[in-house]
Amino acid sequence: ALNVESFLDVPELGASLPVVTAGLPASLAIYAENTDVADASLRAQLLGGASLGMVEGAACIDLRGEAAVEVAASEAGIDDVFSSPGFSAEAWVAVEADALHCQAHMNPLISQHGPASGWELRLRAEGSAVFLVTIAGVHYEVTGPDDPAIFNGKWVHIAGTFDGSSLRVFIAKALAAETNLPEGERSLYPGPLCIGCNPAWRDRGASCHVHSARVSSCALNVESFLDVPSRDEVTEAR
């Protein structure tokens, strides 16, 4: 849980924020707001000038430019969040379409992805999202349909889920696309989990604001996704 007032004065490179680890299934989450459950022994590092701020009255992490958040895999404390056959990645994000790169792989929102390994939730400047997982060393993706109005600086929920066979991407808490994948073992990336950048290729990053982000060790349904950051002018499921 992030106590905004406590951390606004330390936004420089290397500042750290508590990581929330709670609930069943196991999950790792970062919130830019006060919450009741936190494990202060776990820390997410603010990189590249990442800082806390406000968008539409909601606390957020400013990940524009080269800013990012990183959680070291060795320090995460819950191995099944990273290695479970099924998992979910989600975030509440505020982004302007013209701030994104024209190629989706350059806009990683949540990533634990490297060469022939890992997974990544990406943003598309055209107004969509991509969810990628790696099975037996092969990358597989699912992409939602484009909606040019979706990335307009207001809060919108983006998520990807994988249940061991079906790969799904959600936009504004609605299923946008899904595909079935071949059987095989997930190829894990041994490096850190990053929000706002790719841990293996640091020149790739989604320039955006994030209110909250979470990775869970099962394929969540829409009803279990993170709550909205603010009830005012938030993009709900359509």
Image: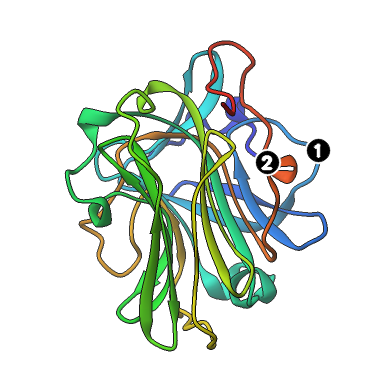
Residue 197 vertical placement versus 179 (above, below): above
In the image shown, does 94 or 130 lie closer to the viewer?
130
Residue at screen point 70% across, 50% down: 221
Q: Which residue is mark 1?
A: 36
Q: Which residue is mark 2?
A: 1
Residue 120 vertical placement versus 96 (above, below): below
Q: Which of the marked residues, 2 or 1, is nearer the chain's N terminus?
A: 2
Residue 236 vertical placement versus 81 (above, below): above
Q: Is residue 178 left or right of residue 38?
A: left
Residue at screen point 35% across, 35% down: 208
Image location of residue 104, percent across then percent down: 26, 51
Q: Quadrant of the C terminus?
A: top right
Q: Quadrant of residue 203?
A: bottom left
The CA distance from mark 2 to mark 1 is 7 Å
Q: Are marks 2 and 1 in contact (CB under 8 Å)?
A: yes
Colour approach in the figure: rainbow
State the SS at label 2: loop
Mark 1 Cα shell of 10 Å, populated few (<14), some (14-19), many (≥20)? few
Query: What amino acid is at disc 1?
Result: Asp
Q: Quadrant of residue 7?
A: top right
Mark 2 Cα shell of 10 Å, populated few (<14), some (14-19), many (≥20)? many
